[in-house]
Amino acid sequence: MPTVDNWQLGREMEYPYEGARPDDQWAGVFDLNKCIECQTCTLACKTTWTHGEGQEHMFWNNVETKPYGSHPVGWDKRTLEDLDPGDWEDGTYEGDTIFEANGTDWDDPENNPQESQQAAGELAGFFPGTDDWRYPNLGEDEIAGDSMESITHFDEETHPVWFFYLPRICNHCTYAACAGSCPVPAIYKREEDGVVLIDEDSCQAFQQCNEACPYKKAIFNPAESKSQKCIGCYTKTEQGKAPQCFENCLGKIRLHGYINPPDEADESDPMAEPTNPLDFVVHQKELAKPLYPQFGLEPNVYYVPPITAPTDYLSQMFGPGVEDAIATYRAMRNGDEPALKGLFKLMGSTEWSITAFEIDGDEAVGYYEGDEVGRVPITEPTTERDRYDEDEDVYRLDIT
């Protein structure tokens, strides 16, 4: 039976095809502690890519309120229920992925996606109906947890009520279920950067990708009778620029670059020499985590967990290591991680993708393919003005 190495699971897993990693892997980091759900990312994507007929329900980028929000309806809860995920033991996932849950023999030629033409039915998950796409703001700002009283006080460790915003795009997965289920196949992963694309001229509307993708980011266009999805703004990233949703993020929560597998990760010290920022935050600091790694797709968008949500909920969403990630984030906020703080200051401070960064004195410097593309102070300078301005004969309320 074909097996591939999935480092996020800590083991090999079953997959319909042989594994083949790209030369470089498109990737991103989202800091959920800074997302304000302004939906600027959503509108930037919508006005660029999904404003045509048949795309009214499409949001290649959307922002959900967790734990109750989802688009399409219940995409995560329904997939998890069908998957019945297992436990993690010392960083290794002991349960079944969506490719393994139904015991499908992928060695059997009859189960080959191009032969069966219904491979998605062999994967755990569901096919979203028309009604499921009608509620992009489902559960927005709905809180979870205990009730609040007028005397309730928050501290850094515990919040009695909580929710957080989860921005989502295509994860451009290493083992993409959309590509692994397409019978044509019209979906492929680019060798040069790992971006997953649909050849719309080849698509024959089997809609297997719409069912197979557990993140539901391959979406059917009924007007065109073909499926469409996020293209990673490859027309921009080929020029070294960050994707639309990254560049337009008002909260500066997004960092675009390229990531290596752990055994090939750049382990340079950014305090001494430039290093790959994605490798640094994901592999070295283990701060950013994949979304539902138990699905088995090895997604390439990574999330910094919110520090005010319950860790049991976050662990089922982002896998093991959440508590350590939160501790690292708090240490960064307290000034104990200057390299991380510098990198996070670079987020959203340049229109360019960042392939390397370093700390230069009290500044963080970002590079794209060796060229400097951003430089920011690690600690923002402040100025205190006089309360009374004699020249203008006015008093200031804000002096800092």
Image: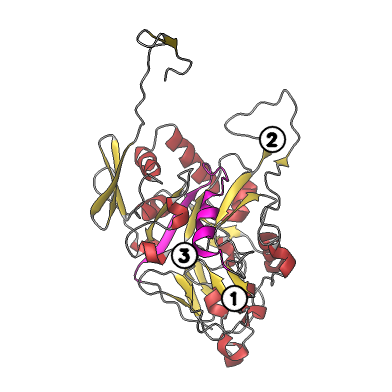
Q: Amino acid at mark 2?
A: Pro
Q: Specify whether residue 39 is painted magenta.
A: yes
Q: Amino acid at mark 1?
A: Cys
As rendered, which of 398 and 191 lies closer to the eye? Answer: 398
Image disc number at residue 7: 3
Q: Quadrant of residue 213?
A: bottom right
As rendered, which of 368 and 104 lies closer to the eye? Answer: 368
Q: Residue at x 74, y 65 (%)?
A: 131
Would you name the residue on which mark 1 appears? Answer: 209
Q: Secondary structure at mark 2?
A: loop
Query: Residue 193: x percent and y percent?
Result: 37, 68
Q: Residue at x 54, y 48 (%)?
A: 322
Q: Nearer the viewer, mark 1 or mark 2?
A: 1
Q: How far separated are the C-alphas under marks 3 and 1?
A: 24 Å
Scheme of colours in the image: secondary structure
Q: Residue 319: tell me if it is visible.
A: no
Q: Is residue 333 left or right of residue 207?
A: left
Q: How far separated are the C-alphas under marks 2 and 3?
A: 35 Å
Q: Specify whether residue 265 is painted magenta.
A: no
The earlier-in-sequence mark between 3 and 1 is 3
Q: Amino acid at mark 3?
A: Trp
Magenta range: 23-52
